[in-house]
Image (cartoon, coloured by chain):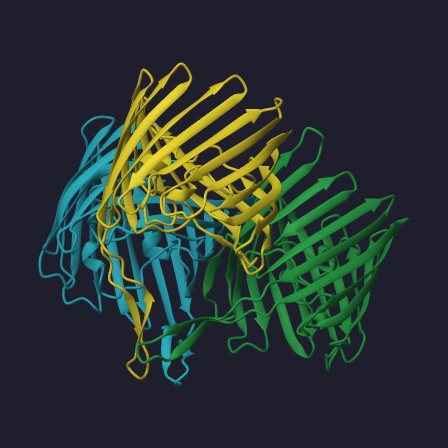
Chain colours: A yellow, B green, C cyan
Amino acid sequence: SARFGLAYNESNAESTRVEQRMRINITGIATTDAGVKFEARFRLESNEDSSNAIAGRGPGAAGFAVSYEGLRVDVGNVSDVIDSGDVVDYYGYGIGLTALVEHNTPFYGNGLPIGGFGAGDQDTTTVKARYTASGFTVAASYSETRAQAAVTTTDSAGDTTVTTAAVAATDEFQIGAGYDFNGTTVGAAYGDDDAAGEFWVATVSGSFGQFGYSVIVGDADAFADVAVGASMNYEISSATSIQALVADGANDADATYGVGFKHSLGGGVTLKGGVASDNGNTLADLGVALSF
Amino acid sequence: SARFGLAYNESNAESTRVEQRMRINITGIATTDAGVKFEARFRLESNEDSSNAIAGRGPGAAGFAVSYEGLRVDVGNVSDVIDSGDVVDYYGYGIGLTALVEHNTPFYGNGLPIGGFGAGDQDTTTVKARYTASGFTVAASYSETRAQAAVTTTDSAGDTTVTTAAVAATDEFQIGAGYDFNGTTVGAAYGDDDAAGEFWVATVSGSFGQFGYSVIVGDADAFADVAVGASMNYEISSATSIQALVADGANDADATYGVGFKHSLGGGVTLKGGVASDNGNTLADLGVALSF
Amino acid sequence: SARFGLAYNESNAESTRVEQRMRINITGIATTDAGVKFEARFRLESNEDSSNAIAGRGPGAAGFAVSYEGLRVDVGNVSDVIDSGDVVDYYGYGIGLTALVEHNTPFYGNGLPIGGFGAGDQDTTTVKARYTASGFTVAASYSETRAQAAVTTTDSAGDTTVTTAAVAATDEFQIGAGYDFNGTTVGAAYGDDDAAGEFWVATVSGSFGQFGYSVIVGDADAFADVAVGASMNYEISSATSIQALVADGANDADATYGVGFKHSLGGGVTLKGGVASDNGNTLADLGVALSF
């Protein structure tokens, strides 16, 4: 997939940048005679950064999956329970080309270890299991970060420089359950991390005709307040939709909100844009997303 | 694509090397219902270097393109007007397996910012637009390099080392026009760069039966003299051609010249070789180029 | 291809790790009208390391091949005579998911330059030629490592740090011959390296019905004793086989031995596991290997 366009971030020294990202996942699949499906994948990616330099990276660490009927196990550089969307709708309807804000935006910057697959290397190995039957889903994940000593160099005068910081050992787990009934999905997940403490997330999402909604509530040891968010999507036509979002809480001083649109041009090309305020910082973007 | 063989460079400590290069472009394409074509691509590459170590790199920064009828816009890690060949034939007929010399060889080493897509990262984002109608082409490009602070490390004694040099902000634009009539193409382009100053290039190219030619002339603030070059191609048979080239000027003390051949073995395999003198330095190569 | 599972190494600080590897070779092929086949390839890879961090690398240095009837020439980041298996069975039947031990295990750690293609960069360019006719194979390889100066940085106090170690120039060649008759293959190869001195390897391998065997013997200037090894494979059924291995000598204090199994689940998925003792160090693994 790829996307490019313009993005504005009030807080950057150069507030406008040319947004440009390309991602390729390389996935290998093998299925046993008994129907157990094995997958392995890694990602190649190119991205702009805030200063407009553009850089490729990857292949990243690989993620693996085994699935059979209602059961799926993921191993390696893979999503944990909350990031995966197995039982909760952690991200909701994002705003704009680059998901300027999502309904979980207040969760960020608070040290929560929630995360998933990417094009980078990983200090953490995650194992996640999910089981689905009759609309009911349960999932559990365990993520282990092993301690690694700092890498240092020593110069001709005997002075040392840390070139790679030490990594502390941490363990984290998440468990959750979700249920799907008549187009409404409810779910909750709880996690506990050696370093970041406890946290939980609950979501309700669904749709009525052209109107879709998702609501999130969560708390964590690291939060001053409960975090709440809601996002909605309205299908104006078969090609065009608008999104709106509001979120607040955790350690944010100001509310987060935004509006955006998506318009399909067919053939996997979608025009997207939005404006948002992220805890008082103004963001905007406009561009095209390519699906290939 | 790939190429391998032997290459000789008089000025290297080890003058002969095993030339070995492999390139893979990964391109994603999506076309809207209205026929607008979007593309994104990045490159993986492996190359020998002058000391015979061989190293892969990439994925590099991505380049994007939007095209519709006579209009094409490129964004990101992409060619500028002169490099793209949209309006001028900047490279002409190269000599040998590795393009030992090209008719623009005197342009190099003078700080001109002309360049294009590759497997590396980029500090510069380029936007180029080209419009073609009835054999007439106009093109303009703008390349912005944003300032980036140096990256430094500090050791245990408080001494600092610059690990990534600072990048200065520069802006550059190029404009050009070309016209194609009865197999003859003429074109000119002008550019202005904050750091390198002004420069221009004009070319005439065409063919008479089996004989093809290309002539280039250009000047720049950075040049002591006008740079001129001419290259030709002669198709001896459907499979075999010879090339010859001469160029001089800019800040070169000596003329650059060379002769080479290409012989197709079918199936995308071409035997190529050449000898050349680049501003007094002798070069030669021989090998196969693979198209895949 | 990919593999994942659990691996145990008694000598690691964290003795058990989640084994996880994915490899993708990208190969370009072009065949001339006369039937000469040219290939170029490089590799992308992700791997865990002993501390459980998982990291991708590549594309590595490229390898090239030209083949025509019984002749094949490899150039670049490619196997030498012994690693290639052209004339000797250097690895035999490996034990377990990760080839915990192979019948040449005592050869390792003694500075022998035997090696092949991988996802990394290379300081060495190898050229290998192989000719096969009527079951008889001869092969020769030459590997040149060019001298490279150390890369150093200088800090604000004038102290220097070596960031990339110097590489010493070395030359190495290997020659060998093998013969295949009635299902039995015998072969021998000899090599000489500027730095590591002389070394030779001889193998006999074959099969009787479901039973396959391979025996290796070799010596080197760097070895205190002759190294010997034997490995066997027994096909219990069309899907299941067991392997056993013993090896000793070179500079090892203790014998190396192991037993393992492979069980095909169909569709390119194979369950593999094994236990081994490598010169006194206990190893074990269990997991699945995916072929794609």
Q: Position of residue B89 (x, y in %)?
A: 77, 58
Q: Is residue B143 above or below residue A178?
A: below
Residue A201 appears in view: yes
Q: Is residue B8 above or below residue A280?
A: below
Q: Quadrant of residue B115?
A: bottom right
Q: Residue at x 52, y 28 (%)?
A: A233
Residue B49 image position (x, y, % from top left): 51, 67
Relative side of A54 to B272, left or right: left
The residue lying toward the viewer, choosing from C38 and A175, is A175
- B271 vs C46, left or right, is right
User: What residue is drawn where x is 66% and y is 32%?
Assistant: B32
Question: Which residue occupies 54% across, 20% down?
Answer: A210
**In the rendered image, the vertical position of residue B36 relative to residue B136, given as above or below:** above
The quadrant of the rendering that contains the C terminus of chain A is top right
Numbered label tally: 0
List x then y, in percent, for residue A83: 36, 37
In this view, the residue in front, B261 or B203, is B203
Closer to the camera in the image, B65 or C44: B65
B56 on left or right of C50: right
Q: Is residue A109 above or below residue B196?
A: above
Q: Please state the horizontal and vertical placement of residue B236, each as a whole percent of the image.
A: 77, 54
Determine the image quadrant of residue B278.
bottom right
